[in-house]
Image (cartoon, grey):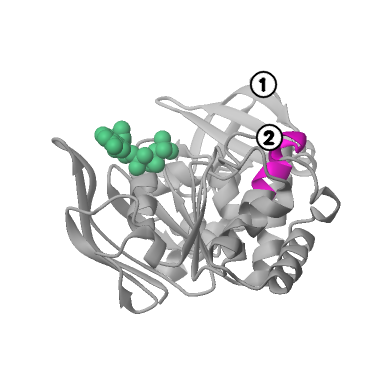
């Protein structure tokens, strides 16, 4: 394990930001701290970085007890949402900064900076000033700068949070590819479940100062530990007294299967390649999402009486899991 957080608690006045949190973060992986705003993700990241002190608990990084070490002795690299670059220095010098203050030989610095600029696809931009870069390019420069000193751990706090949706998505793919190349243990904070599901090897769900669940994207999505995780990770709907995913449901028009609920189709909406069907039963509205092909084959419309049940393959999986 690269980072071991054990029994960490943190209060701000009487407010409990972290409540007895224990997490192990594996070496070489990309781990997301995911959760709603104010849940404690950034506080946890800042405690790993040494920018904040835990009231109780310990932090070990690569086997070394880092709890009492200042940030510069932890060998961690950070990137924040609003990255403060040296405005009057070129991109190259910004990236080289950490190496220069460590008095590395000039030739070594030049070589390393070239390599980093290549890695973050900024090789043509080395001589520009940070103000002459786009937001996405600036964040890539920030990553190159953080990686320059070969940190043991890279910590990213909503690194793409301030960028527009399209650039965000591009950088997300890029981060994944970068990580496949560099393999530095990386922890990144996000409140965006799609970002975490797409990019991370492992996700730690943090809510109200506690860890709700730790697992791979598939584990969290398919076997959430509780309703909170289930709701946070994707769309949900209620079927009877169960919380289920709308795309795990099927609609039937013949005889009702055991466990099915019966209702009327009250709304049909097309969302991209999916069709969202609202079925109103005696006491609830159930949402089902179907592919267009499946929907067409069904031949139902608003007003049709239908049955809704859990898809047979999902029932089989649930039985297997239990
Ligand atoms: N220095 C501080 N002083 C007082 N309260 C703080 C301080 N830092 C954080 N908090 C509070 O602790 C709670 C957790 O904050 P934190 O930034 O860790 O949450 P988060 O999950 O990262 O949320 P966000 O995504 O909004 O940054 C919040 O309610 C916040 O207001």
On the image, the x and y values in percent for residue 257 come to 53, 48
Whereabouts is ligand 1, in terms of quadrant?
top left
Q: Residue at x 55, y 65 (%)?
A: 201
Q: Quadrant of the N terminus?
A: bottom left
The local crowd at label 2, few if under 14, some if 14 to 19, many if 20 or more residues have their Cα within 10 Å, is few
Q: Which residue lies furthest to the bottom in this view?
A: 63
Highlighted magenta segment, given as a residue range: 130-140
Residue 260 or 2: which is nearer the viewer?
Answer: 2
Q: Is residue 10 visible?
A: yes
Residue 143 or 148: which is nearer the viewer?
Answer: 148
Q: Name the residue under label 1.
A: 302
Q: Which residue lies furthest to the left in this view?
A: 14
On the image, the x and y values in percent for residue 156 come to 52, 52
**Residue 206 position (above or below residue 1):** above
Q: In which quarter of the image is residue 40?
A: top left
Q: Mark 2 points at which residue?
A: 165
Residue 16 or 141: which is nearer the viewer?
Answer: 141
Left or right, 221 with respect to 160, comes to left
Left or right, 287 with respect to 111, comes to left
Q: Which mark is residue 128?
A: none
Mark-to-mark CA distance, 1 and 2: 34 Å
**Residue 147 position (above or below residue 169):** below
Q: Residue at x 40, y 48 (%)?
A: 229
Q: Does 133 appear in magenta?
A: yes
Residue 206 or 119: which is nearer the viewer?
Answer: 119
What type of secondary structure mainly makes up the magenta span?
helix
């Amino acid at each position: 394990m690269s980072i071991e957080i054990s029994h960490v608690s943190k209060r701000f006045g009487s407010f409990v930001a972290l409540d007895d949190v224990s997490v192990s973060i594996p070496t070489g992986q990309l781990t997301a701290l995911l959760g709603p705003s104010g849940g404690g993700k950034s506080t946890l990241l800042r405690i790993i970085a040494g920018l904040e002190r835990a009231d109780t608990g310990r932090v070990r990084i690569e086997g070394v007890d880092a709890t009492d070490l200042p940030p510069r002795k932890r060998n961690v690299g950070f990137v924040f949402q609003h990255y403060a670059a040296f405005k009057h220095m070129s991109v190259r010098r910004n990236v080289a900064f950490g190496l220069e203050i460590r008095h590395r030989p000039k030739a070594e610095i030049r070589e390393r900076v070239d390599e980093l600029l290549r890695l973050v696809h900024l090789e043509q931009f080395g001589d520009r000033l940070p103000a002459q870069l786009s937001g996405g390019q600036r964040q890539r420069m920030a990553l190159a700068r953080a990686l320059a000193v070969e940190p043991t751990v890279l910590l990213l706090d909503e690194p793409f949070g301030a960028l527009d949706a399209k650039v965000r998505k591009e950088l997300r793919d890029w981060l994944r590819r970068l990580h496949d190349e560099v393999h530095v243990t990386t922890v990144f904070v996000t409140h965006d479940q799609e970002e975490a599901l797409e990019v991370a090897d492992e996700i730690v769900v943090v809510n109200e100062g506690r860890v709700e669940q730790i697992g791979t994207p598939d584990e969290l999505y398919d076997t959430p530990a509780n309703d909170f995780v289930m709701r946070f990770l994707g769309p949900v709907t209620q079927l009877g007294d169960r919380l289920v995913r709308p795309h795990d449901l099927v609609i039937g028009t013949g005889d009702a299967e055991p466990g099915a609920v019966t209702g009327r189709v009250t709304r049909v909406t097309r969302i991209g390649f999916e069709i969202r069907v609202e079925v109103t039963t005696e006491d609830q509205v159930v949402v089902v999402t179907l592919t267009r092909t499946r929907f067409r084959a069904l031949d139902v419309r608003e007003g049709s009486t239908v049955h809704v049940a859990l898809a047979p393959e999902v029932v089989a999986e649930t039985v297997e899991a239990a």
